[in-house]
Image (cartoon, helix red, strand yellow):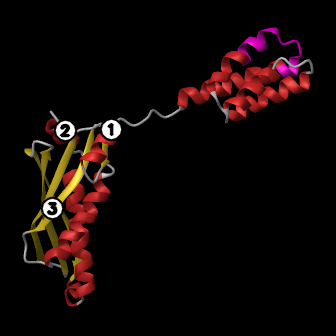
Amino acid sequence: KSPASLIALEAALSDPHPAVRTAAAVALRTLGDPSAIGPLARQMKRESAPGTHAQMVTSIEALHAKTATAPAAPVVKYAVKLGNMKNLTAVRGDALGIVMQKAAKTRAAGIPGAVVVEDEVGAAKVNAPMLVLDGTITSMKHENKIGGTVNFNAQVEFSVSKMPEHALKAALTGGATSIGTQSSLVNAVRINALEDQAIEGAVESALNNCNSGLDQAVK
């Protein structure tokens, strides 16, 4: 898709031989550069070979369609840095905090308008205000239910601070429940998995549709 290739193909549109002109029109369509629409349209007006004329029309239509459907570049509204993730419960200590950290990083990357960065340099590269999310696991409880099931209930909270002022701007809270069986309680691996699911769901709950809070934070 070099400029030289584009220039050569545009020049070939006025070649004396219809087959060459047709091939050039096909190649310009394949190349997909909308700047070829003008040269194609000009040559089409004076094209005498019906088959070549038809190909030029097809190529122009295809290039117009590509221009109309090209996705717009995403707008970066905030650069999000993940701060400290604390576990205030007595369940699994730092290990559960790491689960929250991983879930927050994954979910933050999917926030519309957000880019996850490591520091101020990363925020400067995307030319967006930097927000720091500090997370806390506020609750993790097991609850036995009638019917032989057990609920693992998690609650989390994120504080949103604007940099470089370190000004607390918003709080995002979320909760989720994972469900296992009574037999899960004798299997440490299964217990950990259910706790992880509850934390991941709580993080998703807190960060889902959080744009209004982040919009307020950057003001």
- Closer-to-camera residue (82/22): 82
* Secondary-structure class at tag 3: strand
The residue type indicated by label 2 comes to Ser
Percent position of residue 187, x then y: 24, 89
Mark 2 / mark 1, whichever is N-terminal? 1
The residue type indicated by label 1 comes to Val
Is residue 140 found inside the magenta-colored segment of the image?
A: no
The span picked out in magenta is 40-52
Q: Which residue is mark 3?
A: 84
Checking the image for residue 76, the label placed there is 1
In 3D space, how far apart are the residues under numbered discs 2 and 1 (Cα atoms)?
15 Å
Quarter of the figure with the C terminus: top left
Q: Is residue 111 visible?
A: no
* Secondary-structure class at tag 2: helix
Q: Which residue is mark 2?
A: 212
**Mark 2, other Cα within 10 Å: few <14 / some 14–19 / many ≥20:** few
Q: What's the residue at 39%, 37% (across, down)?
A: 74
